[in-house]
Amino acid sequence: MLVSAAHAKLNLSLAITGRRADGFHELVSLVAPLGLADTLAFDPGRPLGLSCDDASLPTDGANLVLKAAAAYARHRPGAPTGHFHLTKKVPHGAGLGGGSSDAAAALRLLDQASGDPLGVEALEAIAAEVGSDCAFFVRGQAAVMRGRGERLEILPAAARSALVGRRVILVKPPFGIPTPEAYGLLAKTAKYRPLAQAESELAGWIARPAADPSVLGNDLAAPVFAKYLALPVGLESFRRITGLNWQMTGSGSACFAFISGGFDHARLREDVRRAWGQGAWVEETVISG
């Protein structure tokens, strides 16, 4: 039995610079992995299949784990088969990349089981076929993500060290937001950030990485908040109570803030339940790499 963690991610910044002819969007995003992770186990030698402890998730070919296995088999004739079991900790529809990370974990496990690994760079290319942000999760190191998400530039050591170990609090309402919907809402407004501006702002943070990178903003937040009013209303309440800078990650609906010692989790949990109901989710984690 082979086992791999499938870490969540944060889009610490997300600038959308335009829409491509193929319908995807161009982005510039500072992305970091989190300690929060799913667990994917692989039992080689069995027929290809998937089970999951979350009954709400599909376990057929619609799941990115099996899509990743199919992509790996296309590039590696005679690829190992086996049964995957997924233990979920990362909520779906949250903008935390749980499904994409699960897919990348499947590629790592298959490559490990093959006996003749293709290696990280080949896995990143395969991952990009599975989903726009899947390639990031193969290495799972803090990086700048460009293109539709498949072009990665690992952060310089000083910038990575400024992020690793920082505590983050995550909140999510009971509802998720499909990624295509979030980008579609932005496309209707056509309010894109100039590429030169996005690159300049990010370069400024990399040069002074002690600052809070989330102030660089998320261009999906405004159109998403305009439709899902519970998000901005809730975040404004959380800002008043905690004094923290709250931002949406990815396409949402999860939001985050950096915290330090002495943070009052109980007070926040009460406020999140008051704003978003009993199905809301609160989790503390750290930036892991």
Image (tube, helix red, strand yellow):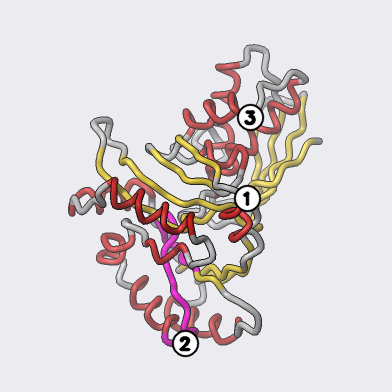
- Marks 1, 3: nearer the viewer: 3
- Sequence-first tag of 1 and 3: 1
- Sequence-first tag of 3 and 2: 3
Whether tag 3 and tag 2 are in contact, CB under 8 A, the answer is: no
Gap in angstroms between the C-alphas marked 3 and 2: 44 Å
Drawn side of residue 256 relative to residue 233, left or right: right
Rendered position, 134 above or below 118: below
Q: Position of residue 172 (x, y in %)?
A: 48, 67
Relative to the observer, which residue lies in front, 2 or 138?
138
Element at badge 2?
helix
Q: Position of residue 197 (x, y in %)?
A: 29, 52
Residue placed farthest to the left in the image?
A: 189
Instruction: Choose top left, top right, bottom left or bottom right for residue 50.
Output: top right
**Residue for point 49% across, 36% down:** 62
Give, as a three-letter code, the residue at label 3: Val
- Marks 3, 2: nearer the viewer: 3
**Residue for point 62% across, 39% down:** 139
Judging by the rendered image, the residue that carries numbered circle 2 is 241
Drawn side of residue 136 relative to residue 215, left or right: right
Mark 1 Cα shell of 10 Å, populated few (<14), some (14-19), many (≥20): many
Gap in angstroms between the C-alphas marked 1 and 2: 29 Å
Span highlighted in magenta in the image: 240-256
Drawn side of residue 93 relative to residue 103, left or right: left
Judging by the rendered image, the residue that carries numbered circle 1 is 7
Drawn side of residue 89 relative to residue 125, left or right: right
Give, as a three-letter code, the residue at label 1: His
Residue placed farthest to the front in the image?
A: 207
Whether tag 1 and tag 3 are in contact, CB under 8 A, the answer is: no
